[in-house]
Amino acid sequence: MPTYESWFRCAGGCEGRFEVTDIIYRCPRCSGLLEVAHNVDALKRRSPSAWMRLFDERYMRTQFPYGSGVWGKKELVFPAIDDVNVVSLYEGGTNLHRAVRFGDSIGLDDLWIKQCGSSHTGSFKDLGMTVLVSAVKEIVSGGGSVQAVVCASTGDTSASVAAYCAAAGIPAVVVLPRDKVSPAQLIQPISNGALTLALDTDFDGCMEIVEHLSLDKRFYLANSVNPLRIEGQKTISFEIVQQFDWEVPDWVIVPGGNLGNVTAVGLGFQMMLDLGVIQRLPRVVCAQSANANPLYLSYLKGFAEFGPMPAKPTLATAIQIGNPVSASRAIEVVKALDGVVEQATEDELSHAAALADATGLFTCPQTGVALAALLKLVARGEIRRDDRVVVLSTASGLKFIDFKIGYHGRELTGVDPLLANGPVELPGDLDSVMKAISSATT
Ligand SMILES: *Cc1c(COP(=O)(O)O)cnc(C)c1O
Ligand SMILES: [Zn+2]
């Protein structure tokens, strides 16, 4: 039997190999990012068709943990973990559906939406968090002592950390900026029993404190500098190809903030190419908010330089990041996948989300950014009518209700709500109802 194995190494190429259960987040030589490496030679000894058969046999079945979209690809994610330490809520296996009417309305014949938000905590963050929290369980069962998993977050990361830690019985500490998070963002970690600390500072202040905490190895860091999250998220690409009966789409569009997800998506496709599961790569589009667009600005200069920036407020709060942790890796991925970086203003992201919603979707503002980028690439002919396009919808729109209420209530600054559809208030009689219906539908 070939040994499938994975380990940490410096993403920048320094010498050194660390266990994926070592509590280490940065290269000791250059302080750069770590990445997970796999024994690709061992993986290649299984034929592409045998891999595809294995993944299809497992997909969304009940055998624990292989019915999970992530753990169905265990050999390529975290081969050495003992199955009893896997903490899974059967993440992945999310709907990939054809957006027929939305596609028609914007001139595309083959547009698909990957609903990563149809997941346990309502965002794709679950795909990475199952791997990270499983690693913690493996560390603890091997005699290591982890007192708590910690993260700084205002939204989706903290929800996911809290849920997976609660499922594992591992304490979670979530550090949030006080009065800067909505009730919807606060209630998931609270319900899942995380120690929820609301600090008198902003997100960056929280992040600084969590980074200091994580110097103490009893506190395991769950922010996306941790490369285990990328390992789980790269299964998005496997799943898309699998759902297309192992065919590669032409384009994949991903909203980017810390840039871990676009990195993961790219690495997933590259790994499939390495294994011979696919014969070509799709093109990737990374879509940023114009108020937090450091990758876009770098792209305009051919990636000759990259500089962090202060992120301005945006409706797409989950990607309001000016100093993305995974920028260097994302740049490599965008180059390798012949990628494009686009941006969307508040008005553009809101309009794109409303257009999509009017055809039956219910998109979060981050997905609105991706859809706005799609509209721009179609308008300038870069994406063509018969191209097969997949847009990653990264979270459930239900997590971002304030955005919807603000749009339809015409209350968003800088947004012209052309598609606002507010409720019609009427007296309680049949006649008024009849009149309202006929004036709206004829
Ligand atoms: C985290 C998140 C993103 C951004 O992903 P990055 O890896 O930070 O680029 C986009 N959309 C949603 C809903 C998210 O929660
Ligand atoms: Zn290094």
Image: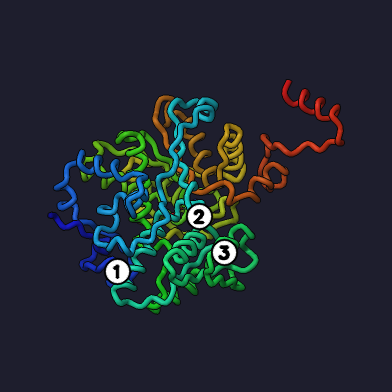
Q: Which residue is labeled 1 in the image?
A: 21
Q: Which residue is labeled 3 in the image?
A: 191
Image location of residue 439, percent across then percent down: 78, 24
Q: Is mark 1 within 8 Å of ligand 2?
A: no
Q: How many marks?
A: 3
Report, in whole angstroms, how far the alpha carbon at label 2 lies from the one at label 1. 25 Å
Q: In front: 69, or 109?
A: 69
Tag 3 or tag 1, which sits nearer the N-term?
1
| Kind of residue at disc 1 | Thr
| Residue 381 seen from this side | yes
Q: Which residue is labeled 2 in the image?
A: 121
Report, in whole angstroms, how far the alpha carbon at label 2 lies from the one at label 3. 12 Å
Q: Is mark 3 within 8 Å of ligand 1?
A: no
Tag 1 or tag 2, which sits nearer the N-term?
1
Identify the element where label 1 is drawn: loop
Considering only vertical position in the picture, is 100 above or below 177? above
For the point 33% across and 54% down, which residue is it? 64
Q: In front: 120, or 304?
A: 120
Identify the element where label 2 is drawn: loop
Dot 2 crowding, Cα within 10 Å, few <14, some 14–19, many 20+ = many
Left or right side of 191 for 242:
left
For the point 30% across and 45% down, which residue is it? 58
Determine the image quadrant of residue 312: bottom right
